[in-house]
Image (cartoon, helix red, strand yellow):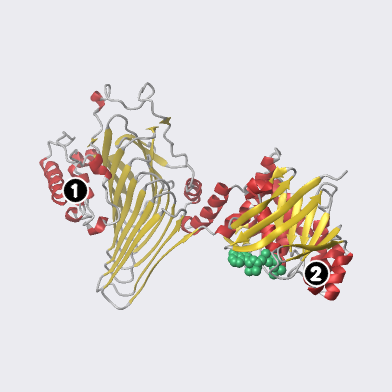
């Protein structure tokens, strides 16, 4: 078995504070180890895949010559796939195998996007935010991510700046003879009154049987009256492991609006932890997943209401086929002083086969009486009479199923404010790729 | 020379371990309209479901040939694409799927099978509006989810609209008249009659002579206890209306 913490030289090793932080990350990861069946937070989603193979960091530029990167002349014999570009109007930032390739030019005034390591060297304020939004002791993958802190972005949207187009972080990944791992950290800051849309798109290029491990931590800071619309489409290669942790801090009257569609990966988890720290801060977390084969896809949320008049809503809907397993863990915490808060959460799943499975764990921690809180879960199957009705009109079985699935996911997709992104994700939420 | 379209021989079928169709025989030639009447629970709807390939029925013996091919081996959608259509006694509600979306999928699936070009949205909407108008279906109804909240009569009109648009060769009407008011009955019958050609055939299931005044059948069959117990011309329907089924049941 390979170790996930490996001795490698990373950029910035000459900065003692950074090296110290990385070491701390490594220590916290090793202390916790990979989650097991006994780890409550990972009860339903055991990242056993990570034990089966060795994962290494991508080779450096100068070593790439010898390494197989499944490019044009690759002889590995696997099916090659072109990575899909992000085609909507956006400021695009490209990553390949976890490394930053390109940042859009012509960014509007008041928007700064820097490679993380550059921001660290320049030390222009990132230290106030870096690694400040979560607890490494409780989060092994975020600790591991810290141990490899190097790649990613520092994005600042200045006071009252409203972005006219989304920022799109587009990831193409692949691996061939060796299993690669990528650790990405994005620190995103919306100052008071700023408004932005951010899209994260994870897809693969090259070998469709790529085994790789993407480990992302996003630290999102939303200032007073600021609003972040955060969209994500996880469409990794089918043998990939994708683990993402979104730590979101929302100040007074600020708003976080997240939507995540997951369709790829063999094991994938999108975890969102929102802290509503000041009065009237709001969060909406919506998600959809559609899966087949043997995949496990996990959506975990944790919303902390820490101030009065805060509000959160969550709608998560899944479609599970094959022998796949969908997991939803949703926690709402309401602090004693957080009076007049509202928290609502709903998970629904459609099971397409007898072997498909879902595990749902809602958790409410309410420490005062003056709140409105609700949660619910439901699961169902496709209606045989509806399927027959459509087939009796000439519609093929698979097409009929897709029509019902589209209808099922419609309300959650409707939560997406941006019409282009809604159309894009609706077109991607299909049973057949 | 008559061309047989549908040939049912000695058909036996069960559902939930209960024998419903017991030795059913009937041949329908191109151009013919056959009516089936029979008491509640006789198995009329069951027959219509079996002919359309609804899952859940076990065919225990017999054969059904459609255009000379083994119908029972075909998937429901293949049957529909080959021209079989059923107006259901109880049309199904499908929340979240607008009538327009659904019918566009259906029309294009069938056109593709016939090697006809797909209709684009404009052409399709035009066709839908025109045919809908004839049946007294307003455009708003077409935007609503299939059958959800539709009145009994509206459901049957929508079934008739589908028939008019999908242009089947063999239609089964399972109580197409139930729930329709007097005027709607006329309109629906008209739409159905418009599909009567020398190549098309129909099987009309009804309890009432009323519908058969508008859609005049070539043959009327009495179906009881899983098979046909009497056959005749349209006058047989009148006889049933006046005297009920008792006489046919006793004969057995
Ligand atoms: N899934 C089922 N399980 C058990 N019995 C069934 C099932 N489906 C149909 N039956 C029975 O089969 C018999 C025939 O039903 P069917 O609906 O074909 O009758 P019908 O002739 O169409 O009656 P009606 O005139 O009332 O429409 C009935 O006794 C009915 O209860
Ligand atoms: Mg019936």
Residue A159 on image: x %, y %? 33, 53
Residue A127: numbered disc: 1
Marks 2/1: CA distance? 96 Å
A379 sits to left or right of A24 = right
Name the residue carrying label 2: B251
| Mark 2–mark 1 CB contact (< 8 Å) | no
Of the four image quadrants, the one with ligand 1 is: bottom right
Can you give x and y, in whole percent of width and height, for residue A300 in the image? 32, 57
* Residue B247 on image: x %, y %: 82, 72
Tell me: B109 left or right of A80: right
Identify which residue, B189 or A427, lies in the foreground.
B189
Observer-nearest of B236 and A353: B236
Q: Quadrant of residue A211?
A: top left
Residue toward you, A139 or A252: A139
Is ligand 1 closer than 8 angstroms to the Cβ of mark 2?
A: no
To which chain does the residue with label 2 belong? B
| Front disc: 2 or 1 | 2
Q: Chain of mark 1?
A: A
């Amino acid at each position: 078995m390979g170790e996930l913490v490996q001795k490698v030289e990373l950029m910035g090793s000459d900065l003692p504070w950074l090296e110290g932080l990385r070491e701390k990350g490594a220590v916290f990861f090793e202390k916790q180890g990979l989650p097991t069946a006994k780890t409550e937070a990972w009860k339903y989603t055991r990242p056993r895949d990570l034990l089966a193979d060795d994962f290494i960091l991508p080779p450096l530029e100068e070593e790439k010559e010898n390494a197989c990167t499944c490019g044009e002349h690759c002889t590995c014999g696997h099916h090659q796939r072109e990575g899909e570009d992000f085609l909507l109007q956006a400021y695009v930032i490209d990553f390949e195998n976890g490394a930053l390739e390109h940042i859009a030019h012509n960014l509007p005034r008041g928007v700064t996007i820097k490679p993380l390591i550059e921001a660290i060297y320049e030390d222009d304020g990132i230290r106030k935010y870096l690694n400040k939004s979560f607890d490494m002791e409780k989060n092994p993958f975020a600790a591991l991510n810290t141990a490899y802190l190097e790649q990613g972005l520092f994005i600042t949207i200045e006071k009252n700046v409203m972005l006219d187009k989304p920022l799109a972080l587009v990831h193409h990944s692949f691996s061939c003879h060796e299993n690669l791992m990528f650790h990405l950290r994005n620190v995103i800051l919306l100052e008071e009154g700023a408004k932005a849309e951010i899209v994260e798109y994870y897809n693969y290029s090259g070998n469709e049987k790529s085994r790789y491990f993407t480990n992302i931590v996003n630290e999102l800071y939303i200032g007073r009256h600021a609003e972040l619309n955060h969209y994500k489409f996880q469409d990794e290669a089918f043998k990939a492991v994708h683990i993402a942790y979104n730590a979101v801090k929302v100040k007074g009257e600020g708003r976080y609006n997240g939507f995540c569609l997951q369709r790829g990966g063999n094991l994938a988890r999108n975890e969102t932890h929102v802290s509503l720290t000041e009065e009237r801060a709001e969060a909406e977390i919506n998600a959809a997943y559609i899966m087949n084969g043997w995949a496990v896809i996990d959506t975990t949320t944790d919303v902390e209401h820490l101030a009065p008049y805060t509000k959160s809503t969550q709608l998560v809907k899944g479609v599970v086929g094959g022998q796949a397993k969908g997991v939803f863990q949703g926690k709402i915490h309401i602090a004693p002083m957080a009076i007049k808060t509202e928290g609502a959460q709903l998970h629904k799943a459609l099971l397409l086969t007898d072997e498909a499975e879902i595990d749902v764990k809602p958790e409410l921690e309410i420490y005062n009486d003056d709140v409105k809180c609700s949660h619910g879960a439901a699961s169902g199957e496709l209606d045989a009479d509806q399927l027959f009705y459509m087939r009796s009109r000439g519609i093929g079985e698979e097409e009929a199923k897709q029509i019902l699935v589209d209808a099922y996911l419609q309300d959650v997709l409707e939560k997406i404010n941006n019409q282009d992104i809604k159309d894009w994700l609706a077109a991607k939420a299909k049973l057949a790729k | 020379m008559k061309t047989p379209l549908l040939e049912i021989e000695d058909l036996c079928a069960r559902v939930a371990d209960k024998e419903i169709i017991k030795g059913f025989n009937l041949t329908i030639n191109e151009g013919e309209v056959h009516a089936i009447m029979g008491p509640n629970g006789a198995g009329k709807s069951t027959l219509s479901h079996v002919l359309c390939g609804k899952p859940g029925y076990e065919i225990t013996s017999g054969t059904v040939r459609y255009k000379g091919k083994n119908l029972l081996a075909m998937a429901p959608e293949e049957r529909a694409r080959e021209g079989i259509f059923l107006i259901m006694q109880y049309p199904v509600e499908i929340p979240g799927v607008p009538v327009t979306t659904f019918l566009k999928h259906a029309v294009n699936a069938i056109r593709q099978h016939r090697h006809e070009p797909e209709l684009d949205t404009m052409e399709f909407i035009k066709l839908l509006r025109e045919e809908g108008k004839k049946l007294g279906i307003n455009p708003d109804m077409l935007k609503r989810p299939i059958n959800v909240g539709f009145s009994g009569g509206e459901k049957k009109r929508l079934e008739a609209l589908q028939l008019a648009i999908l242009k089947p060769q063999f239609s089964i009407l399972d109580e197409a008249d139930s729930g329709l008011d007097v005027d709607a009955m006329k309109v629906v019958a008209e739409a159905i009659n418009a599909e009567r050609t020398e190549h098309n055939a129909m099987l009309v299931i009804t309890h009432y002579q009323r519908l058969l005044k508008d859609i005049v059948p070539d043959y009327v069959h009495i179906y009881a206890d899983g098979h046909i117990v009497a056959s005749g011309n349209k006058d047989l329907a009148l006889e049933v209306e006046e005297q009920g089924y008792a006489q046919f049941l006793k004969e057995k």
